[in-house]
Image (spheres, helix red, strand yellow):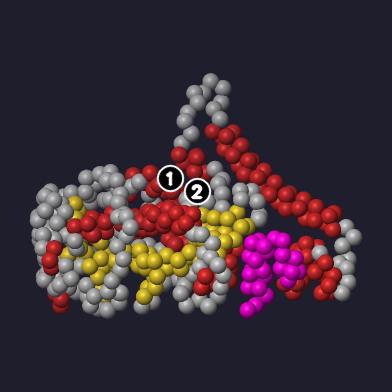
Amino acid sequence: MDTTDDTLYMKQYVSQHPDNKMAWYLLGKQYMLRGMDAKANYCFLQSGEIYDAYERKRHPLAEQPQEMLQHWNRRQHRKRLVRRVAGLAAIFLLFVLLMPSNGERVEKVSDDAIAMQPVEPPIGVVLVKQGDRRPIGSAWNGILAWPEQPKLALAVRLEEEDGWRKWTGTKRILMSVNRESGSSAMNVRMHDSAACNCQPADSSVAKTELDRWAQEQELRWTLSSAIYQYNRLYGGWPQKLEQLTRSYPYNVLSGDTPEMRAMFNTLLAAVKADREEKDSGKGQSEGTGQEQTAMFVPGTEAVHKQWRQPLQIVVDKATHRLAVVSGDIIVRSYPVGLGGDETPEGSFYISEKVRNPNGKKDGPFGNRGMTLSNTLYAIHGTDEPDSIGLDKSLGCIRMGKADVEELFDLVPLGTAVTIKNGTLPSKAAAPAERFKLEPQANESNPAKVYRWLN
């Protein structure tokens, strides 16, 4: 284990056991090895007589320990004060810019202006892979690399199978790190006995926060994917969310939510930055399966770019599964009906999304349909639910009613679809709650009679 890992572990232990003088002494030794003398001296003074016993001398600053500790605390206080003043200055500047001149009527502050106000990121999440032999050390490295420290950070391990991580599977919380507002102090709790070799702390609060964050993350996946696909399809950027939720055939998104409206400006700026970085040759290509490390809620710029990979669809003919994926994470997995050799393998995209393709809510194609690359192949519902899991179609991909409704909302127009033979796990847990958007426009197309290869 290198000195960085040792230091992180000791910092974590000291935060949990602030009265343990030996821990302070050992942390000080780690800082000395890294050339961080000021922090080392602070720790040595906290260790008191332990330093004297092991070093066989008094610390050079031991005659004035309180003065040094007070100096250290003053420095930390000044750092916090600077951050607060900067935040207040930004708010004041915003107020001045929005303040009406003499005789002007006071207007309501727009949602866009509110989104500009600086906020502390409430939660951040690090995903630790199952094969990581130093899960806590890796989690700390991820947390400390964030440009802003959230009020709550969670280290989480997803259920894994065949190289895939399952979003709807078991989520194990390894560690939680709480930080009080405006403070640099961190309160660390370990929640997994296998990861810490300790008696784990209660994780009920952390689990509630993780569940809430996971629901918001699904909205971020869908919205950022929609922004990306809008740019790819139309060559420009949406200036407002309503441009994504237009009527057929421009229904990039099948609706929205209040949370999506709040996060739109932040994600738009982030996806634009991703595109500029990729065009300059500095960015990673989409769908590379890069490690996904952290994500803050909307309202901050610290949105980790690898969480914004566009959602993709993978269909596995061998297991009769359709999955929505982001990197190596299976966001959703559904059983499907196929057509055996009649279902083509290869790369496609969703070129059309339509509600009630039969002109009514029931019929051979069910109440949702998504055309693949302007062909006669499609992903759609079915009036033969017993055919799910079998090769009964003429080439199309059949889905159950609830599944196709969720997929229709989850993936935007333009989403890439890859049909393979043997790639996905044969089973996946159902989501605790279905993903659902609030419809904003008419997505039906009564002028067309669909003749997909059902």
Q: Residue at x 74, y 74 (%)?
A: 33
Residue under label 1, please give it.
Answer: 262
Q: Are marks 1 and 2 in contact (CB under 8 Å)?
A: yes
In front here: 374 or 46? 46
- For this view, does 358 lie left or right of residue 69? left
**Figure quadrant of residue 208:** bottom left
- Could you tell me which residue is drawn at 17 percent across and 65 percent down? 398
Q: Can you give x and y, in whole percent of width and height, for residue 107 in the image?
A: 47, 28
Circle 2 sits on which residue? 299
Amino acid on which disc 1 is placed: Ala
Where residue 450 appears, as percent x and y from the top left, is 11, 58
- Can residue 296 be seen in the rendering of this structure? no
Which residue corresponds to the image point at 87% horizontal and 62% vertical from the top-left? 62
Distance, label 1 to label 2, CA atoms, is 8 Å
Res. 134 visible in picture: yes
Q: What's the magenta bit mostly, secondary-structure-wise? A: helix
> Does label 1 or label 2 sit earlier along the sequence?
1
Q: Residue 41: x and y, percent?
A: 80, 65
Magenta-highlighted residues: 1-27
Q: Is residue 440 above or below residue 342?
A: above
Q: Is residue 230 above or below residue 143?
A: above
Q: Residues within 10 Å of mark 1 (few under 14, many from 20)?
A: some
Label annotation for residue 254: none
The amino acid type found where label 2 is placed reads Gly
Q: Which residue extends farthest front?
A: 199
